[in-house]
Amino acid sequence: MQNPSVILLVKFTSTLTPDEVRKVVNSRKEDFRALQGLQQKYYLQEPSTGEYAGLYLWKSIEDFNSYRDSELRKTIATAYKTIGEPRIEVFEALDVLRE
């Protein structure tokens, strides 16, 4: 895998149970697998707060921008029944520890 140039963190609180969140994750995986330039996505839960997160590794800013403007991105809050809008943080990858 090529080193990512953009890293996206999407974090939210959901009204769904953990089992319901897993079902949503599984139902959407193929949509994310089909995205050009998405090298990896990690589905996360923070035990201390119960919040969920998605950590995305993007090959290029252009690929990230295509996702940012997509209908798939716009469905996060609805799909996961979030409380408020998800927090979105975008990072530029400066360097990596291991190649």
Image (cartoon, rainbow, N blue to C red):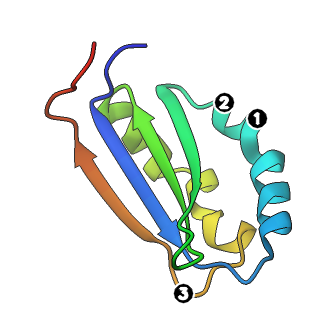
Q: Which residue is mark 2?
A: 33
- Callout 1 crowding tier (Cα within 10 Å): few <14, some 14–19, many ≥20: few
Left or right: residue 30 compared with residue 48: right
Which corner quadrant holds the N terminus? top left
At 58% from the left edge and 79% from the top edge, which residue is drawn?
A: 13
SS state under label 2 = helix
Q: Which mark is residue 55?
A: none
Which residue type carries mark 2? Arg
Mark positioned earlier in the residue sequence (3 or 2): 2
Residue in the foreground of this view, choosing between 66 and 76: 76
Left or right: residue 11 compared with residue 4: right
Picture coordinates of residue 43, whole percent (x, y): 60, 50
At 37% from the left edge and 25% from the top edge, which residue is drawn?
A: 59
- Mark 1–mark 2 Cα distance, whole angstroms, equals 5 Å
At 38% from the left edge and 43% from the top edge, which residue is drawn?
A: 65
SS state under label 3 = loop
The answer to which quarter of the image holds residue 21 is bottom right
Left or right: residue 13 compared with residue 27: left
- Callout 2 crowding tier (Cα within 10 Å): few <14, some 14–19, many ≥20: few
Q: Which mark is residue 30?
A: 1
- Mark 3–mark 1 Cα distance, whole angstroms, equals 26 Å
SS state under label 1 = helix
Picture coordinates of residue 55, whole percent (x, y): 47, 48
Residue in the foreground of this view, choosing between 48 and 1: 48
Cβ–Cβ under 8 Å for marks 1 and 2? yes
Picture coordinates of residue 98, whole percent (x, y): 26, 18
Which residue type carries mark 1? Glu
Q: Which mark is residue 84?
A: 3
Which residue type carries mark 3? Gly
